[in-house]
Amino acid sequence: MSEENENQTQSEENSAHSAFETGSITVEKNGHFIHCLTIIGQIEGHYILPSQNKTTKYEHVIPQLVAIEESKEIEGLLIILNTVGGDVEAGLAIAELLSTMKTPTASLVLGGGHSIGVPLAVSCKKSFIVPSATMTVHPVRMNGLVLGVPQTLSYFEKMQDRIVNFVENNSKISADAFRSLMMKTGELIMDVGTVLDGDGAVECGLIDELGGLSNALEFLNKTIEMENAECSGQ
């Protein structure tokens, strides 16, 4: 094997290993390069979760988003979500980055988009959900020792306001309607909140459209072509 072929093989192996580790891949469709990023399991924030947990590490995701935004080759970004939630600040940080990207973005909820996965799902230019997926909307919670003092309650309330405002600004649901879903009683055992299936998430305005992978890719391709046409016209 020549040195050039050996280097190419090594590069492909490194790329495959990187895709396996980070759950991301770039594919070409209709002449456009679209990057696919998966957010699965639990979103890991400031604390390392046990090794048996499936996690998405925010320190891996954030640099990828910056690289995608700066890339001249990547024209679109597809976020695939199947997450139980996780660290509120880490999840909200990723969602804020996604919402401010100029690169065309689409999200697709498969399986579940629970807890802090809700802001992540609505952060893209257009959101899709399959009929069998579910989304759990509930108030902010914290594990471990919590001091029962007014400052703690104030902190929870401010964090919750940030989430509610973000969801309202990036979806079709109003703040009051979202809060009512958060505070609903009688649906979750030992907790308050609401579980929405695909139809319910679209009906309340949380998610834009029912659809799958082909619908999300079709939206990205159309958006890319429209933007390219506008640039050509100028």
Image: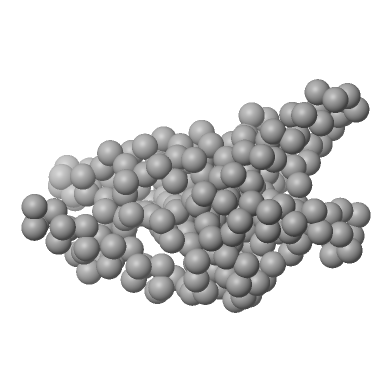
Q: Quadrant of residue 50?
A: top right
Q: Quadrant of residue 229?
A: bottom left
Farthest residue to the left: give it.
233
Residue in view at x 31 percent, y 49 percent: 103
| Residue 60 x, y percent position in the rendering | 48, 37
Q: Quadrant of residue 181?
A: bottom right
- Judging depth in this view, the residue of 149 and 213 nearest the camera is 149
Q: Image check: 31 left or right of 116?
A: left
Residue in view at x 35 percent, y 67 percent: 219
- Judging depth in this view, the residue of 184 and 74 nearest the camera is 184
Vertical placement of 205 versus 10: above or below?
below
| Residue 161 x, y percent position in the rendering | 66, 40
- Judging depth in this view, the residue of 221 and 59 nearest the camera is 221
| Residue 26 x, y percent position in the rendering | 33, 55
Q: Image check: 233 left or right of 44?
A: left
Residue in view at x 74 percent, y 29 percent: 155
| Residue 63 x, y percent position in the rendering | 41, 35
Residue in view at x 9 percent, y 56 percent: 232
